[in-house]
Amino acid sequence: MEMVIPDAALLAQWDRVRDQLLKEYGEATFSSWLQPLSLVKSNDQGHVVISAPNAFMRDWVRDHYFRRVESLLKACNENIRQLELVVSEDPQPQREVGRGAVEIPADMADIEALGAQLDPRFTFDNFVVGKPNELAHAAALRVAESAEVTFNPLFLYGGVGLGKTHLMHAIAWHIRKCHPERKVIYLSAEKFMYQFIRALRFKDTVAFKDQFRSVDVLMIDDVQFISGKDSTQEEFFHTFNALVEQNHQIIVSADKSPSDLEGMEDRLKSRLGWGLVADIHPTTYELRLGILQAKADQLGIQPPQKVLEFLAHKITSNVRELEGALTRVLAHATLVGRDITIETTQEVLRDLLRANDRKATIDDIQKKVCEYYNVRVAEMHSPKRARSIARPRQVAMFLCKMLTPRSLPEIGRKFGGRDHTTVMHAVKKVEELIAQEDSIREDIELLRRMLET
Ligand code: ADP
Ligand code: MG
């Protein structure tokens, strides 16, 4: 039976499987091992082939994730009988893209091979800048463009799917293009750990150390992964210091700020906060719309503006999900040959829209507000009236009224059994404050966005 390129329906199912894998395994594992897999061909007999970029990754995936991938895919499509995992026939195609005609010296190629592949789509050109990510973008561009080290390390942090990896790859592509003589290595913290463990096992730690310490720019993605992994942290710490001493650039990303990284040694946390710490905030409507437009332009498709606006309104979780939604809508339209409308969009994305409609609960709100103002949740319930606690409590009550369908008495009860008039008073008070003070307006806006994503 001849194998052919998979059709759009199968690719859409594969996309769904990938979304699910991301949820189940988390960002770090997903981007290191699962994202690089592609569904390459299939036939009428239900035989499907997926490929991994190299034998090492194929083996790791086979031993760790294959059964889950298979069962998810079969659950999406009951015609699938056999799933095969192979090494991509097109060895490391992406590595060629950014290098162009530049010849990479052999030893440098070796060193870069330690790292992970770069996604050819993740360039500065393809990155849409808006308020939530402008600081991170400017810092990334600065590091990419300047040969001098101005801040070390650059620490990028933010929630899942907001563009951290994209920015790091963009830096690497830029340096490869403009300064091909500089050694850049990009890898996930998970892969760093894996390399380290392998070096230990093969008693090859000297080579390991030399390799990492000889680079000009070291990028470690999702550093939270090494939380609680003491010996890897130790090694990373030494690598870090060695590079800083030689004035070489380090770029690190994480899902939290350095001080909030749990399970990290204090000395490492403090080192990570030494340079510039840039956070990426949750997306705004404008940014989401900009991203959708850019993506549609790239694909050379112009869906109705109304549909893009609808998606930007509805899919607020993160950019990855937003892109996935657009892809699904476009794939569906191509598949059934119908125009893209808001109705078909709603239909195709029913499950996703429901998930994005998820309402915050009173508990969520209390927790977030407490984190934000640095007070303890117990203090929300306590009778204390000190302003440092009373104000966050009022803000939390206000948000509960705004964001949940709960009544005033219900809200009062959840705040240590307070009366509904207290809640009413809090709501009025916060409304007044919003009208008067920019800072509180910003606090509320930020909290609202965090709670809605
Ligand atoms: P993170 O590493 O923060 O979890 P990624 O960098 O993997 O997120 O981004 C998820 C997806 O969203 C990628 O496909 C990326 O290209 C896209 N993306 C994120 N932010 C932007 C942006 N500002 N402009 C264009 N695409 C973006
Ligand atoms: Mg990432």
Image: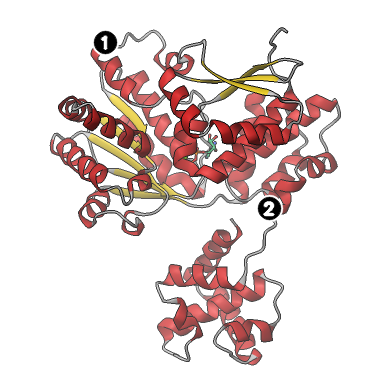
Please determine whether, in this image, residue 369 is positioned above or below residue 96.
Answer: below
> Which secondary structure lies at badge 2?
helix
Q: Looking at the picture, how far across and down is residue 436, in whole percent?
A: 53, 76
- To which quarter of the image does residue 363 belong? bottom right
Q: Quadrant of the N terminus?
A: top right
Name the residue at 68% across, 53% down. 355
Instruction: Tell me if mark 2 has few (under 14), some (14-19) or many (20+) residues whose alpha carbon lies within 10 angstroms of its own.
Output: few
Give the mark, 1 or 2, whose residue is nearer the N terminus.
1
> Which secondary structure lies at badge 1?
helix
Name the residue at 51% across, 32% down. 34
Q: Is residue 253 visible?
A: yes
Please determine whether, in this image, residue 333 is positioned above or below residue 391.
Answer: above
- At label 1, the amino acid type is Ala
Image position of 232 (left or right of 439): left
Image position of 273 (left or right of 36): left
Name the residue at 25% across, 45% down. 233
Image position of 254 (left or right of 435): left
- Estimate the spatial distance between the alpha carbons at disc 1 and disc 2, rounded to whole Å: 49 Å
Query: Mark 1: is the Cβ under 8 angstroms from ligand 2?
Result: no
The residue carrying mark 2 is: 355
- At label 2, the amino acid type is Ala
The colour scheme used to paint the residues is: secondary structure
Q: Looking at the picture, how far across and down is residue 177, in whole percent?
A: 37, 19
Image disc number at residue 106: 1
Name the residue at 41% across, 76% down. 375
82, 122: nearer the viewer: 82
Q: Is residue 123 visible?
A: no
